[in-house]
Amino acid sequence: SLTSADITSIGQGTKTISVTATDTAGNISSVTSKTITVDTLAPNAPVINTIAGDNIINANEQTSSITGTSEANATINLTIGANTRTVTADASGNWTYSLTSADITSIGQGSGKTISVTQTDTVANISSVTSKIITVDTLAPNAPVINTIAGDNIINANEQTSSITGTSEANAT
């Protein structure tokens, strides 16, 4: 059996292992060789690009794509709320996942929501986690309230510059 010391000794990459057999009389066989690849290193954490242009998912962006980069052909595991989704990176390492309504429901509304991603390379080494903090606000605000204008909702000649005021969701425009 190979040990971690053996792997450290032979190093990473394509290697050739050669063996012979010696019988009890001291006769030595011909050499048999096998080429192997040693890849015990976890890939770097994948990259998650900006989601929905600003990391805020609104009502019109509920099926936005989450995109990123990884090692070529890696398996990408996304955690979105309680959902785990899997996609495969292409030969250039680009990957895409399109959100579903189930993902939005699982992650919930509000700020500070986390989408986490790992990649598993083609030989089953798993990267560390990359996370992206997003805001999910897919609910329309309540209708704004217009306060009484000019004291009686009648604008006379002296009140032509009256302000129109009201209330709405904080920071709404």
Image: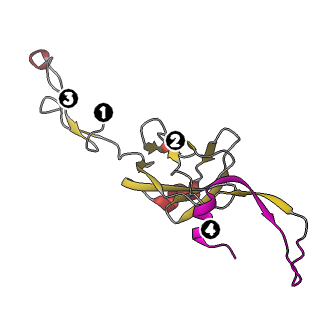
Do the CB atoms of the residues marked 3 and 1 lie less than 8 Å apart?
A: no
Amino acid on which the number 2 mark rests in the picture: Glu
Q: Of marks 1 and 4, which one's residue comes earlier in the chain?
A: 4
Per the rendering, the mark at residue 164 is 3
- The circle drawn on residue 6 is 4
Q: In the structure shown, which secondary structural element does the residue marked by tag 2 occupy?
A: helix
- 123 is within the stretch colored magenta: no
Measure the alpha-carbon separation of dots 4 and 3: 79 Å
Q: Nearer the viewer, residue 165 or 55?
A: 55
Q: Quadrant for the N terminus, please.
A: bottom right
Mark 3 surroundings: few (<14), some (14-19) or many (≥20) residues within 10 A: few
Q: Position of residue 75 (x, y in %)?
A: 65, 54
- Asked whether 173 or 1 is in front, the reply is 1
Left or right of residue 121, residue 155 in this image: left
Which of the two discs, 2 and 1, sits closer to the camera?
A: 2
Q: Say if 23 sits above or below 165 in the image.
A: below
Task: Compute the Cα span from label 3 to label 2.
Answer: 32 Å
Q: Report the amino acid beneath label 3.
A: Ile
Residue 36 higher or lower than 82, as above or below: above
Residue 133, percent from left and from top: 40, 50
Q: Decide if residue 96 is on the left or right side of residue 57.
A: right
Q: Quadrant of the C terminus?
A: top left
Among the two numbered marks 4 and 2 on one chain, the one whose residue lies closer to the N terminus: 4
Type of amino acid under label 1: Thr
Q: Nearer the viewer, mark 3 or mark 1?
A: 1
* Residue wearing tag 1: 173
Separation of marks 4 and 2 at Cα, in angstroms: 51 Å
In percent of width and height, residue 92 lies at 66, 38
- CB under 8 Å between callouts 4 and 3? no
